[in-house]
Image (cartoon, rainbow, N blue to C red):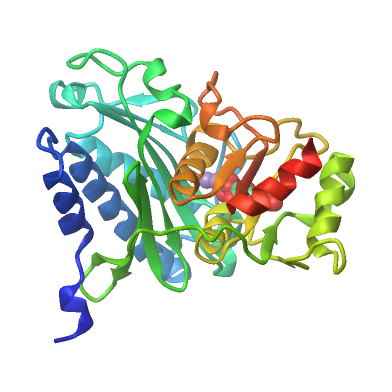
Amino acid sequence: MPRYNNLMTLDEFTIQQLRLFPNATGELSGLLRGIGLAAKQVNREVNKAALADILGVDGSINVQGEVQKLDTYANEVFIKVLRSGINCAGIVSEENECMMLFDDAKSNQSKYVVLMDPIDGSGNIDINISIGSIFSVYRRVSELGKPAVLEDFLQPGIKQVAAGYVIYGSSTILVYATRRGVNGFTLDNSIGEFYLSHPDMRMPPHGRFYSFDNRYYNQVDPKLKRYVDFCISTTENRKGPYSNRYYGCMVADIHRNLLKGGIFFYPQVEGRPEGKLRLCYECNPMAFITEVAGGSATNGRQRILDIMPEHIHQRTPLFIGSKEMMRDLEGFLQ
Ligand code: AHG
Ligand code: MN
Ligand code: MN
């Protein structure tokens, strides 16, 4: 029997988890099933890319700037899947300026809201390099039966019930975390199922990679400059020098760091006092996954998951990675 037949599908896995909780309703399993379905549809378009006329810009701009066709497509797919399910009361997306409420009787009964970056690393679409999707799930604080409210989305990251990402790389992998652990599922394209391929992912406490866009080297805080020097030092860094890897897709960089150990940072730079990355649908979910896997994440002063968001699109500097490497970094930033 191929090894395969013994592997669990994403659905089987979430249902197995559900059985561990007598009061569980299956809503989170339903939500993850929907996200898995949306990921498969995005994956199909990513694979056809040039053939499907999905390369290039869309013509519109979002809060971030220029929008690629695939950003728009993925956004629509995730919204459609989540809206047609009954497990999500509303969403916040990088591609939509305002929150979107699924204000119907069934959706208003749902206890979850979702925040997402439909395509992360959009700059890589046209050149066939890894891209991702990121999602974050919160339990609503507002009354069930009524439409969700802004406060449901503006919760500190520590309150996430689940968070995950999909990486469309040399294979397509969906990774999601709950407080219980982080698990990765690889898409078998031939039958269109995600199978558990990376059970109970743990981030190595130390690694050999640092991910930072070196074009900013001369713009960052001198303390951080000293840390970058440390990363590549052959004398000072006993575990170095580290290799520099920067894909322009945080999902891909953090996925590698989760598996191999490493550190990623997008700090404050000239013209970007809060860095570039978004707290609610980029940093919080990646920080949650990383912490559950044994790593850590800060904005340079404070734990990412403790930040109380004020705006759905707010930015934050991000330092995230293997525990010991983060400890070294914090020594430099003090
Ligand atoms: P998005 O494609 O959703 O706009 O996010 C891209 C992010 C992140 O994934 C990546 O690490 C970073 O932006 C790259 O930005 P720079 O080109 O400024 O390095
Ligand atoms: Mn992004
Ligand atoms: Mn994006």
Relative to 302, say whether 194 is above or below: below
For the residue pair 76 and 208, the one nearer the viewer reads as 208
Q: Quadrant of residue 236?
A: bottom right
Residue 142 visible in this rendered orientation of the protein: yes
- Asked whether, in this view, residue 241 is left or right of residue 105, the answer is right
- Residues 183 and 217: in front is 183
Q: Position of residue 58 (x, y in %)?
A: 52, 48
Q: Is residue 202 above or below residue 292?
A: below
Split into 4 quadrants, where in the image is the C terminus?
Answer: top right
Residue occupying the point 67% across, 64% down: 209
> Which quarter of the picture shows residue 155?
top left
Q: Residue at x 76, y 43 (%)?
A: 331
> Where's the N terminus, which quadrant?
bottom left
Position of 213 compared to 202: left or right?
Answer: right
Q: Residue at x 15, y 58 (%)?
A: 12
Q: Is residue 67 visible?
A: no
Q: Position of residue 264 (x, y in %)?
A: 65, 52
